[in-house]
Image: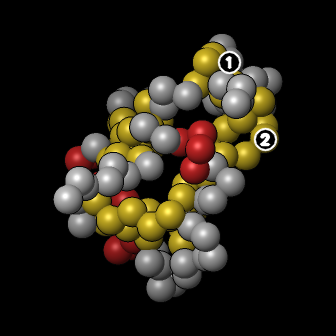
Amino acid sequence: MQKTKNVISLSQNAANRINDLVNKAENKVIGLRVGIKSSGCSGFKYNVEYAYEEKNLEEKIIDKGVTIFIDPTAIMFLMGCEMDWKEDKFSSGFIFNNPNEISRCGCGESFSLNTAS
């Protein structure tokens, strides 16, 4: 039997950060939800938020001991993506290494996707 590949993979740093966020949340959180929103000068930005319940048609991914849910409208744009967590002296945040991106804006906050069918 062939193992199916997850829509998105997590680095160990991302899994550690997700675990910290879920464990420190004030309300009952079952994981994080990842999606894409229209925004910025390049068209899209990644959206990460707490997941309090599993929504209809979401992709549920359990990887490295944590759970993330993928917004169904974002699945095709996140295929093959790796979610990482980077922290340095001046900033910290989730980083998405997405093979579907075709460009990023100068500030790095938004990106363009290959939406051709």
Asked if marks 2 and 1 touch (Cβ < 8 Å), the reply is no
Rendered residue at 53%/42% (across/down) = 78
Horizontal relation, residue 37 to residue 98: left or right: right
Using the image, determine if residue 80 lies above or below residue 2: above
Image location (x, y in percent) of residue 44 = 72, 35
Between disc 2 and disc 1, whose residue precedes? 2
Question: Which residue position holds label 2?
Answer: 38
* SS of the residue under disc 1: loop
Q: Residue at x 44, y 78 (%)?
A: 30
Q: Quadrant of residue 23?
A: bottom left
How far apart are the two marked residues, 2 and 1, measured between alpha carbons?
A: 13 Å
Left or right: 12 as drawn, with respect to 112: left
Is residue 47 in sight in this rendering?
no
Image check: 57 left or right of 60?
right
Q: Amino acid at mark 2?
A: Ser
Q: Position of residue 49 (x, y in %)?
A: 58, 61
Where does residue 80 sit, x and y in percent of width and height? 42, 37
Outermost residue on the front side: it is 1
> Label 1 crowding class (10 Å Cα cut-off): few <14, some 14-19, many 20+?
some
- Residue placed under numbered mark 1 in the picture: 105
* Quarter of the rendering containing residue 76: top right
- At x 58%, y 25%, the residue is 101
* Residue at screen point 55% across, 28% down: 100
Image: 71 above or below 39: below
Tag 2: Cα neighbours inside 10 Å, few (<14), some, or many (≥20)? some
